[in-house]
């Protein structure tokens, strides 16, 4: 499916932020900046009911019925404007996966979707209702990242779902006006403090710019149009919290450390020497304030997280990850990363791609963590059993790992270019094994 040219410029509509524009222009033939999510149901999703729920609630989110106009106009800029002749049916597709209709066939179908672009001439999303695996249903939804970041997508999802099976019968709740975060006045900072902050940020930017490129591994190489996905069995959030409490770490520390262990095991299994090896992940950092209830837009930074590939011991690796995570939290890297993201939106598309590739070359993968609903949800009357997602890879990277929590469970997803990691399920299987070993050592 080829992307048509955007509509003509318009003086109406909400302007895209610099961050949103950066992600709109980030698409490349071998990497589309589209977030792909998966919801699994144990029963068949009622398609007509699903469409009626969407029809009743899509109006809560104007961007789901809008397109981007004016991307080439330097004065008017890019704006969200209503799509001409919006038709919900054009965004909903029903398919059945090939026999035997199991997880492997579903993963292959999703991998094919990940390799396709979103049509920029229409609202930037689509849903695929898939009969299977088994007697259930899989719902795959794809949103272009310019619509919003992970937390915005979760809030949007929650407004389309219900907390009970019969909730879909109720009229949609009148949405509250989204609140922008309240900025607390901290007085006028001293000039010396401002100067110190500026020097610190400049030093951080210089250090990040001068970082060496990540070493050659099977995770880096030439990209193709073919993608592959996998996801782990759910990990008990209570069990992960127990490990974190027992070791003085966080839930995120624990999951990142077992992902690092799985990545190291994959490399060793494919002939890569890991003694002394450290690779970096590009990690989005949520910058939304707790009182920011907006369901659109991007408010996240990017930082580099060093992963200790050489450490085979689960407890030592966990401590190494904790030290690195604590260092980043105490640094100015998130603030500098946000400036870089916004700066990309000021560049012409070709220069943006070159700059993005330069900084992405210092990493080997993207690693994303999104917190989903803490209780089970229902969509069109059907309970969602498991959820996960796959984040797009920045600047030509070919591997992405995602962490998603839902209803007391954590699922780890992996997306890869087939030319680099042909079976990402080897990595997600490794995540399960690494967590089991970490649990055993903590007990």
Image (cartoon, rainbow, N blue to C red):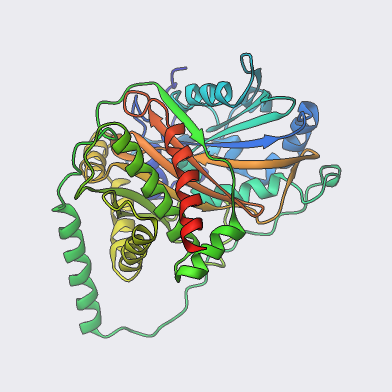
For residue 315, above or below residue 32: below
- Residue 192 appears left or right of 283: left
The percent position of residue 418, horizontal first and vertical second, equals: 37, 24
Residue at figure coordinates x 59%, y 33% from the top left: 141
Residue shown at 20%/42% (left/top)?
A: 358
Q: Nearer the viewer, residue 82 or 361?
A: 361
Can residue 77 be seen from the camera position used here?
Answer: no
- Measured as percent of width and height from the top left, residue 108 is found at 51, 22
305 displayed left or right of 49: left
Q: Position of residue 170 (x, y in %)?
A: 85, 46
Q: Is residue 338 above or below residue 122?
A: below
Given residues 34 and 188, the one toward you in this image is 34
Q: Quadrant of residue 26?
A: top left
Q: Is residue 352 left or right of residue 141?
A: left
Taking the image as drawn, is residue 214 in sight?
A: yes
x, y (%) of residue 280? 28, 49
Q: Nearer the viewer, residue 45 or 62?
A: 45
């Amino acid at each position: 499916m080829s992307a048509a040219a955007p509509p003509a410029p318009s003086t109406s509509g909400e302007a895209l932020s610099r961050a949103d524009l950066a992600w709109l222009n980030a698409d490349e033939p071998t990497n589309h900046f589209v977030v792909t999510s998966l919801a699994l149901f144990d029963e068949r999703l009622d398609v007509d009911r699903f469409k009626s729920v969407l029809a009743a609630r899509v109006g809560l989110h104007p961007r789901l019925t809008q397109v981007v106009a004016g991307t080439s106009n330097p004065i008017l800029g890019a704006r969200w404007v209503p799509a001409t002749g919006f038709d919900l049916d054009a965004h909903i597709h029903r398919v059945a996966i090939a026999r035997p209709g199991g997880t492997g066939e579903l993963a292959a179908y999703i991998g094919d979707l990940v390799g396709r672009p979103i049509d920029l001439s229409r609202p930037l999303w689509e849903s695929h209702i898939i009969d299977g695996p088994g007697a259930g249903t899989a719902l795959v939804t794809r949103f272009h990242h310019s619509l919003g970041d992970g937390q915005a997508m979760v809030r949007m999802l929650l407004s389309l779902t219900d907390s009970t099976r019969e909730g879909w019968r109720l009229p949609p709740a009148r949405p509250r006006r989204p609140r922008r975060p309240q900025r607390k006045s901290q007085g006028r900072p001293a000039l010396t403090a401002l100067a110190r902050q500026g020097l610190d940020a400049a030093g951080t930017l210089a250090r990040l710019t001068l970082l060496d490129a990540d070493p050659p591994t099977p995770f880096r190489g030439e990209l193709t149009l073919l993608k592959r996905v996998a996801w782990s069995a759910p990990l008990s959030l209570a069990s992960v919290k127990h490990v974190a409490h027992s070791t003085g770490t966080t839930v995120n520390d624990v999951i990142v450390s077992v992902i690092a262990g799985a990545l190291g095991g994959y490399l060793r299994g494919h002939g890569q020497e890991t003694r002394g090896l450290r690779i970096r992940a590009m990690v989005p950092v949520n910058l939304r304030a707790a009182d920011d209830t907006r369901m659109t837009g991007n408010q996240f930074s990017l930082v580099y997280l060093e992963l200790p590939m050489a450490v085979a011991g689960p407890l030592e690796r966990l401590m190494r990850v904790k030290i690195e995570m604590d260092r980043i939290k105490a640094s100015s890297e998130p603030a500098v990363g946000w400036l870089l993201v916004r700066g990309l939106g000021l560049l012409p598309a070709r220069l943006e791609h070159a700059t993005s590739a330069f900084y992405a070359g210092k990493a080997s993968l993207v690693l994303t963590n999104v917190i989903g609903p803490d209780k089970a949800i229902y969509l069109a009357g059907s309970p969602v059993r498991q959820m996960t997602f796959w984040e797009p890879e920045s600047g030509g990277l070919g591997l992405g790992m995602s962490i998603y929590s839902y209803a007391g469970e954590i699922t780890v997803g992996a997306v890869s270019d087939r030319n680099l990691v042909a079976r990402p399920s080897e990595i997600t299987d490794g995540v399960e094994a690494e967590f089991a070993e970490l649990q055993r050592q903590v007990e």
